Amino acid sequence: MQPVFLLTDLFVYAILLFVLWYMWRVRSDRNLRANWRLAMRRPVAMVSSMVLGFFLLVALTDSIHFREALPASAGQTSTQYASEANSILDKILQPLATARERSYSEPLSATAFRKETFERDGVSVRDYPRLRFGGKHLKDSAAELSADVSSQTWSALGLGIGIILATLLLGLAMATATTGQAFSVVLTHFKNGQTEWPWRSMALTFSLMVLVITWVVMLSQGYHVFGTDRTGNSVLVFALKSVRTALVIGGLTTLVVLPLALLLGVTAGYLRGWVDELIQYVYTLLASIPDVLLIAASVLLLQVFIDKNQGVFETSLERADARLFFLCLILGITSFTGLCRLVRGETLKLRELEYIQSARAFGVSTPRILWRHIVPNLMHLVLINTVMQFSSFVLAEAVLSYVGVGVDPKTASFGVMINTARAELAATPLVWWTLATAFGFMFLIVLSANLLADAVRDAFDPRTRLRNASPVMSNTQEVAA
């Protein structure tokens, strides 16, 4: 096995390292730790974090690429590797990816979606043919399909409930040993939600996620749970592969926006004068250009460069990844103006405060004032805006891919799925499951990011912060007393 590092993979690893560093910094900073405690004590924030954590785990497993070693032949002295790279997620989903059908098939179906002419018992008939993979273990699909799906559903629910109960009992036992309280007391506080952290909401979310994942995994062994597309590929596989694209665009574009907006906004607001006018001219000029036109022109220029220089990228995966990386850069350059204006306006207000005036009077250098006094007092705005922009970048990718100037058509993304569904919605009969799957996954990602952004805003913004005002906190204090 030969490791392969794509451009976006390196930035995914960089984001992971940054998150780990920030967690370490939060633990060592009392104010940050208090703000994050306030945010995460809200049930909606913890539930959103769990959902986003699951999607981040999927994206991370799809960001570890490698080339498999080919079987050795006679007289071969060196190890040969496959031309295309795969990820850990590809290996996990390989049984579903290889179970291809001829064309469309509905979710949990054993027959094709459209009638075909074929021979049955030596007679030419026009009917719905059996699928190659979906329901192939059934002898009579018409009579056995419903009973088999119901049986596997109950089995999945039983397995999921067993996992949930085992995890719940283990957690309660650990809480009993940690707090020194009786098991019945811990269980009562858990059921009534009288805990410092929203464990009840987390348990309900964990239970729902376990049940859904268990059901999908068990039924995927014999069916296409979310159906197949026009080429017979599993829609579930394409949707899971699209998660990485959405999170890479959201995360990588945010990393491009942050330094540009923070550096230019703070510099313009603090120095003022001709520096402020120059920076305002730059971001006003960029804001006046339609984003879609600039992105389309940049992506088309990159595509021309890739077509004329095939030797720069060894595989089609590297070419598609380069287009994704370049799209994130262009999207970040065209999207930093809003945050830059916000940072500039807040810096103009902060530079007139007394502690900044005192620092200048004592001869503190300008870079030190910016780094030690201005930037820390802007971070609540930056953090809130970052989390809120993440979801907008995920939606932007879908729109750009829909109009044909987004990611490479061979790259799995929600925008490509929606673009494919545009023709399917006009078909007769209606092919609805591709659009429904893309909508469901995007809805969960964007909704979770928005809800987490609301909780972070309430905790970090001094004007909306409400410390110790939630009923859970008051109940916890009463129990402790």
Image (cartoon, rainbow, N blue to C red):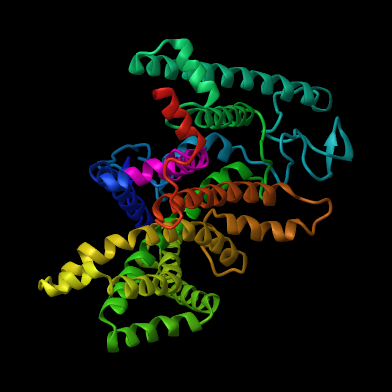
Q: Quadrant of the C terminus?
A: top left
Q: Where is residue 350 in the image (x, y as percent from the top left)?
A: 30, 70
Q: Does the magenta stretch include residue 53?
A: yes
Left or right? Give the position of 96 relative to 278. Answer: right
Q: Can residue 102 be seen in this view?
A: yes
Q: Residue at x 55, y 16 (%)?
A: 162
Q: Quadrant of the N terminus?
A: top left
| Residue found farthest to the bottom | 274
Q: Is residue 462 magenta?
A: no
273 over 63 or under it: above or below: below
Along the line of sight, the residue nearer the viewer: 404 or 202:
202
Q: Where is residue 285 in the image (x, y as percent from the top left)?
A: 44, 85
Q: In which quarter of the image is residue 24?
A: top left
Span shown in magenta:
34-60
| Residue found farthest to the left | 363
Q: Is residue 265 visible?
A: no
Along the line of sight, the residue nearer the viewer: 208 or 131:
208
Left or right? Give the position of 119 relative to 455. Answer: right
Left or right? Give the position of 373 relative to 129. Answer: left
Q: Which residue is drawn at 30% across and 50% down?
A: 18
Q: Which residue is drawn at 39% across and 14% down?
A: 176
Left or right? Give the position of 299 relative to 226. Answer: left
28 over 299 or under it: above or below: above
Along the line of sight, the residue nearer the viewer: 85 or 408:
408
Magenta stretch mostly in which secondary structure? helix
Q: Where is residue 150 in the image (x, y as percent from the top left)?
A: 73, 22
Q: In which quarter of the image is residue 139?
A: top right
Q: Position of residue 187 (x, y in %)?
A: 49, 16
